[in-house]
Amino acid sequence: MFAALVLAAALVTPTPAAVPDQTPPPEPNHVTIEADESYLQAAGLSWRHWNGFVSQLSGRYEFQASTSLRFADTFHWERLSSAYTVNYAGQTITAPYSFNEWDDEFDIELGRPEIPTGVGVGYYDYNHVYEPWTTYNIAGFGVGIDRWANYYVPRSVYYSVWYYPDVRGAQPGSDAYGIARVDVGLNFRKSLVSPWSLRIGVQDESWFSRDPDDGNSNYLEPYVSLSYWR
């Protein structure tokens, strides 16, 4: 009799509804390509007073290493072609000047996908030519933080702060600097379906010489950028 009652109760008791999985799906891998055109304004020693248009190109790959670990690698390159003017022996001399600069930044991503932030390490390489026969190269490692644009909304703020404490040449006694770079701007998306965005921002780069006789310099670059994100 008791077994019959238990069986009857089991038959009339409704089956509990399945609880939906509350775990958000993993963020997909992303590729971002940015093409910038900026105008560099330099301040520092007289022989570093050059201005000119700078072309920049960068690419970033964000990828999921595990369920709780996500990385981003950003490669950035820029190129300036200009001239500098110096007074020497009572004469004003104008000579060609150009530089190539690139850096690679590897970040661990923090926070939620709609707050895309990362901290990481970077490598900075700078090669400039005052005249065809006076080329030199300096390079070094640094650390920084990135707050990337949020591509899921029409408008978002982005910024990055990086510091390279010891950027120098390979030869003993070569120039050495501490270099701080700050980048801040706004990202605009006309359509959240389209992969294209417009960015307007400013980049500021400060060079702190390790040689007291060399002096410091600063480079301000307002820019506009076309960005592709997928």
Image: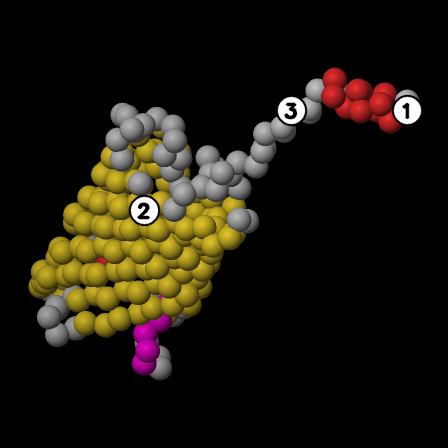
Decide: few, some or many residues near mark 1? Use Cα within 10 Å; few <14, some 14-19, many ≥20: few
**Lateral position of residue 148 relative to residue 47, left or right:** right
Q: Quadrant of the N terminus?
A: top right
**Lateral position of residue 162 relative to residue 50, left or right:** right
**Lateral position of residue 202 relative to residue 87, left or right:** right
Check disc 3 and give the amino acid type: Ala
- Per the picture, the main secondary structure of the magenta-coloured stretch is loop
Q: Which mark is residue 191?
A: none
Check disc 1 and give the amino acid type: Phe
Q: Is residue 34 above or below residue 135?
A: above
Q: Which residue is mark 3?
A: 17
Q: Which residue is painted at 29% across and 28% down in the image? A: 193
Q: Which residue is mark 1?
A: 2
- Under circle 3, the secondary element is loop
Q: Nearer the viewer, mark 1 or mark 3?
A: 1
Q: Which residue is painted at 23% across and 54% down in the image? A: 78
Residue 164 visible in the snapshot: no
Tell me residue 222's x, y (percent).
26, 41
Residue 68 visible in the snapshot: yes
Tell me residue 8's x, y (percent).
79, 20
Q: Is 202 contained in the magenta span?
A: no
Q: How is the image coloured?
A: secondary structure
Which numbered disc flags the more N-terminal residue, 2 or 1? 1
